[in-house]
């Protein structure tokens, strides 16, 4: 894929050696991103307009593989900026990043400023139940607790929490609400997909009536005219999975990377990204755009507060419990 003014999108294997990566990445800002191609293309267009003097190399991949790559390169960093992954995932790699006091910080929702961490929130995922009415027998579940009824066995799907930060947010939230008993009951009911996208695709295709997924993913089907798809915000409260970006410590081009960082947090670009992807922005001044999309405002959604640091600290133990409960 080629972009104007020397912007390039590189698909690079996670197994690429550090030495060859350093030789390849000669542009002004080297951006490692797990975001979708359409979102990346939108960002590159904005950068081309607002900072035409900056050339950007974009290295795409899964957030986990990119973070491991940054770790492998830490003796000679190739990346300048990482965009983005869940706060609880970033917590395991915090030593790889440098903090930056962006001038955009005052415009962000307080929960996404991450003042004590070397990253800044870019967006947040809201966990929902995605329902396909065409294959639903009876009423849809209204809460996470409803899903624990054995009657839902094999009718509900979720991603593997060991491989999906959003699925781990769902698992940790249910653990917060219902303890180990809730985790075990959920494990008895759900069918697990190998990837996050496998969940919403399976529900959209009618393979399951209900999926535990992210708001933005389900909303894209609704906006696309798939009338049988709807979103349920669980009555016992839902969970947020905030995502952040960070400057890579000792990256080769920190000053230009900060300019890209600030543009990624700008009002116009955050609104455009929301309108394209339905991912809720980290800014607090975009309620009008959110309301126009048909999604509820955050103040109208019941949220279970999650300590992202605790979620990261308890990850290994909770995943062990999940694996044992799944058998």
Image (cartoon, rainbow, N blue to C red):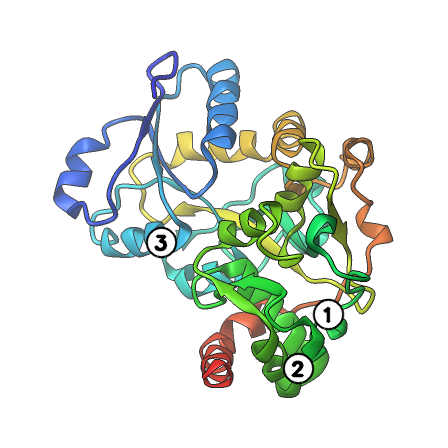
Q: Quadrant of residue 57?
A: top left
Identify the residue at horizontal 40%, vertical 61% (top origin): 93
Where is mark 2, residue-wise?
Answer: 182
User: How far apart are labels 1 and 2 at the CA level?
Assistant: 9 Å
Identify the residue at horizontal 26%, vertical 38% (top origin): 12
Left or right: residue 151 versus residue 139 is left
In the image, residue 173 sits, relative to residue 39, either above or below, namely below
Tag 1's secondary structure?
helix
Query: CB atoms at circles 1 and 2 under 8 Å apart?
Result: yes
Q: Position of residue 215 (x, y in %)?
A: 67, 48
User: How far apart are labels 3 and 1 at the CA level?
Assistant: 31 Å
Q: Quadrant of residue 218?
A: top right
Query: CB atoms at circles 3 and 1 under 8 Å apart?
Result: no
In the image, residue 246 sits, relative to residue 103, either above or below, namely below
- The foreground one among 263 and 293 is 293
User: Mark 1 or mark 2: which comes first in sequence?
Assistant: 1
Which image quadrant: the N terminus?
top left
Tag 3's secondary structure?
helix
Other-residue count near label 3 (Cα within 10 Å), few / some / many at <14 / 14–19 / ≥20: many
Report the mark closest to the observer, 3 or 1: 1
Left or right: residue 119 versus residue 266 is left
- The foreground one among 134 and 140 is 134
Where is mark 3, residue-wise?
Answer: 67
| Residue 85 seen anywhere in this rendered image of the structure | no
Other-residue count near label 1 (Cα within 10 Å), few / some / many at <14 / 14–19 / ≥20: many
Q: Which mark is residue 144?
A: 1
Q: Position of residue 184 (x, y in %)?
A: 59, 84
User: Mark 3 or mark 1: which comes first in sequence?
Assistant: 3
- The foreground one among 67 and 38 is 38
């Amino acid at each position: 894929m080629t972009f104007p003014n020397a912007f390039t999108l590189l698909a690079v294997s996670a197994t690429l050696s550090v030495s060859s990566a350093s030789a390849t990445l000669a542009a002004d800002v080297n951006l490692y991103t797990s975001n979708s191609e359409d979102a990346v293309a939108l960002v590159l267009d904005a950068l081309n307009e607002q900072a035409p003097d900056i050339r950007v190399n974009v290295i795409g991949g899964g957030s986990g593989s990119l973070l491991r790559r940054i770790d492998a390169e830490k003796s000679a960093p190739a990346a300048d900026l990482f965009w983005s992954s869940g706060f609880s995932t970033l917590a395991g790699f915090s030593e790889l990043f440098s903090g930056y006091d962006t001038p955009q910080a005052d415009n962000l929702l307080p929960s996404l400023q991450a003042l004590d961490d070397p990253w800044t929130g870019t967006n947040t995922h809201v966990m929902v139940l995605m329902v396909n009415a065409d294959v639903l027998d009876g009423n849809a579940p209204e809460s996470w607790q409803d899903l624990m009824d054995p009657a839902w066995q094999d009718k509900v799907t979720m991603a593997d929490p060991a491989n999906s930060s959003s699925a781990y947010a769902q698992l940790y939230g249910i653990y917060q609400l219902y303890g180990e008993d809730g985790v075990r009951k959920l494990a008895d009911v759900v069918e697990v997909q190998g990837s996050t996208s496998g969940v919403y695709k399976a529900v959209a295709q009618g393979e399951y009536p209900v999926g535990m997924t992210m708001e933005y993913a389900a909303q894209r089907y609704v906006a696309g005219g798939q009338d049988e798809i709807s979103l349920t915000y669980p009555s016992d409260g839902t969970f947020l999975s905030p995502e952040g970006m960070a400057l890579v410590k000792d990256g080769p081009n920190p000053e230009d990377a900060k300019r890209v960082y600030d543009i990624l947090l700008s009002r116009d670009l955050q609104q455009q990204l929301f309108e394209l992807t339905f991912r809720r922005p980290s800014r607090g001044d975009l309620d009008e755009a959110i309301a126009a999309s048909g999604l509820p405002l955050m103040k109208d959604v019941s949220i279970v507060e999650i300590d992202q640091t605790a979620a990261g600290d308890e990850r290994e133990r909770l995943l062990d419990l999940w694996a044992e409960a799944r058998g």
